[in-house]
């Protein structure tokens, strides 16, 4: 499996699609349609899909407010760096530590984790308790690939870290509390039941829901889809994938309606915390216990604003819970804009372009306490921009300037 560079993520994703409903044993390219049906049949007595995954806790969808962001800057020319952003002032402290040209971020308690992806295959752990010192590093290796390409990090309630690999059929498990980095790797979860002909299911995003982990897979061969994208359920106690339909041949997961699950957010309509909003070619509402998906924002709704296929890049839920903000390609990549559109046909029923003339990095859009944060990677004027949603105005007129364009950020606990 040939790994991909984050610089080419959007371009390469254009080759992917999510055709019709199907199980994960099919290796046939069925087209380029992005619409499908839910994968679980409805109960004939209640009209609801049966429960296929028992969840013992709400899902960890991340922070909805934060005093600080971690920020990676990168333009593939200057040295990438890790910095921090104070959200209350706001103020940027740049280049505290070196980063890489393809760094994803994760955090828990006082740990900040840098996952260095394409061509790097390394994990750095930073101790935020003091001066943001590097606590240790470990190389990411796997027998199935010389370039396993770790995609990110997700924590369970006990503090163990889970790292999906894009080019190998595994989610690796790390314990960063171990004193020596050589002891961090604790094992792995085998994803080979969902692999396609190249031996990997191309795992990406992940979400912990108590003792169940959901991992998004794309199933590509040479960046061409073999069927559709899925969310795979994993029993963390057994360290094994769950087959959501034992009566169907092959391992079964939650089928998504669109391709390439990029981001997962909390569905504000579900107080149990067991329903996810997933960004694909639209915004899908996925019932994680029943294994079903429906469009909260259908691709044809986005298409009315010229947002097609793989144009959506990142999204955040608005404070009212009735709409979402979406960063999407606006013209030719990397040109981007931020749009707002209602969930389930709420207002605004069609996407409204709020902010244009932007350049996108890697999924830099957060709504924190009524402020919308965006990393504008425009090489001529790189900056982190902040908007007050209530007044629809930019809080810092010139933005928070960065010497090197912002590439990725996350809110910190």
Image (cartoon, rainbow, N blue to C red):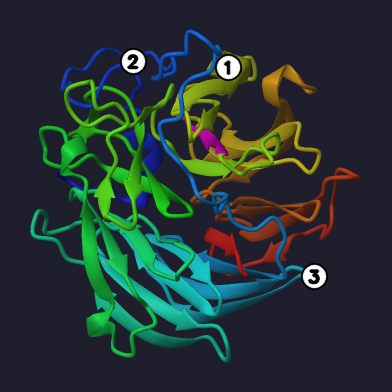
Instruction: Report which residue position mark 3 lands on.
Output: 88
Task: Find numbered disc 1 in the image and state the secondary structure of the residue it sits on.
Answer: helix
The residue lying at 35 percent from left, 21 percent from top is 18
Determine the CA span between mark 2 and mark 3: 46 Å
Mark 1 or 3, nearer chain start: 3
**Viewer-nearest of labels 2 and 3?**
2
Which residue range is magenta in the image? 275-280
Residue 56 position, x and y percent, is: 50, 50
Q: Residues within 10 Å of mark 1 (few under 14, many from 20)?
A: some
**In this view, which residue lies farthest toward the top?**
44
Q: Is residue 321 above or below residue 137?
A: above
Q: Residues within 10 Å of mark 2 (few under 14, many from 20)?
A: some
How many angstroms separate mark 1 from mark 3 (CA)?
Answer: 36 Å
- Quadrant containing the N terminus is top left
User: For numbered disc 2, what is the local secondary structure?
Assistant: loop
Q: Position of residue 233 (x, y in %)?
A: 35, 42
The C terminus: image quadrant:
bottom right
> Which mark, by number, is residue 303?
1
Q: Position of residue 180 (x, y in %)?
A: 29, 89
In space, the residues marked 2 and 1 are separated at their CA atoms by 22 Å
- Judged from the image, the secondary structure of the residue bearing numbered disc 3 is loop
The local crowd at label 3, few if under 14, some if 14 to 19, many if 20 or more residues have their Cα within 10 Å, is: few
Mark 2 or mark 1, whichever is nearer to me: 2
């Amino acid at each position: 499996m040939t790994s991909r560079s984050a610089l080419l993520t959007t371009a390469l994703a254009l080759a992917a699609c999510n055709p019709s409903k199907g199980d994960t044993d099919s290796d046939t390219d069925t087209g380029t349609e992005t619409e499908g049906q839910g994968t679980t049949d409805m109960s004939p007595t209640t009209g609801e899909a049966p429960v296929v995954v028992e969840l013992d806790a709400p899902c960890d969808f991340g922070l909805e407010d934060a005093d600080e962001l971690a920020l990676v800057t990168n333009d593939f020319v200057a040295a990438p760096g890790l910095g921090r952003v104070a959200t209350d002032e706001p103020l940027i402290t740049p280049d505290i530590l070196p980063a890489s040209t393809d760094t994803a971020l994760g955090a828990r308690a006082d740990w900040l984790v840098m996952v260095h992806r394409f061509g790097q295959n390394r994990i750095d752990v930073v101790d935020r308790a003091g001066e943001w010192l590097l606590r240790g590093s470990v190389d990411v290796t796997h027998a199935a690939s010389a370039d396993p390409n770790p995609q990110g990090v997700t924590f369970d309630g006990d503090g163990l870290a889970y790292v999906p690999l894009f080019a190998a059929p595994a989610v690796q498990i790390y314990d960063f509390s171990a004193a020596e980095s050589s002891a961090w790797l604790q094992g792995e979860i085998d994803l080979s039941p969902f692999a396609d002909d190249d031996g990997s299911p191309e795992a990406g995003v992940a979400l912990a829901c108590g003792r169940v982990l959901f991992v998004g897979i794309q199933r590509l061969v040479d960046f061409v889809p073999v069927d559709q994208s899925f969310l795979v359920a994993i029993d963390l106690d057994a360290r094994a994938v769950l087959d959501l339909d034992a009566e169907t041949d092959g391992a079964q997961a939650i089928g998504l309606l669109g391709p390439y699950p990029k981001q997962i957010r909390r569905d504000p309509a579900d107080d149990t915390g067991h329903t996810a909003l997933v960004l694909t070619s639209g915004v899908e509402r996925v019932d994680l216990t029943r294994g079903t998906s429906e469009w909260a924002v259908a691709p044809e709704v986005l298409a009315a604003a010229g947002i097609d296929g793989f144009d959506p890049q990142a999204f955040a839920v608005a404070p009212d819970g009735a709409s979402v903000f979406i960063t999407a390609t606006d013209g030719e990549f990397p040109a981007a804009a931020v749009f707002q559109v209602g969930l389930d046909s709420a207002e605004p029923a069609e996407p409204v372009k709020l902010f244009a003339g932007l350049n996108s990095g890697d999924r830099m859009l957060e709504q924190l306490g009524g402020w919308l944060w965006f990393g504008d990677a425009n090489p001529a004027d790189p900056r982190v921009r902040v908007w007050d949603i209530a007044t629809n105005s930019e809080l810092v007129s010139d933005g928070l300037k960065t010497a090197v364009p912002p590439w990725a950020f996350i809110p910190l606990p």
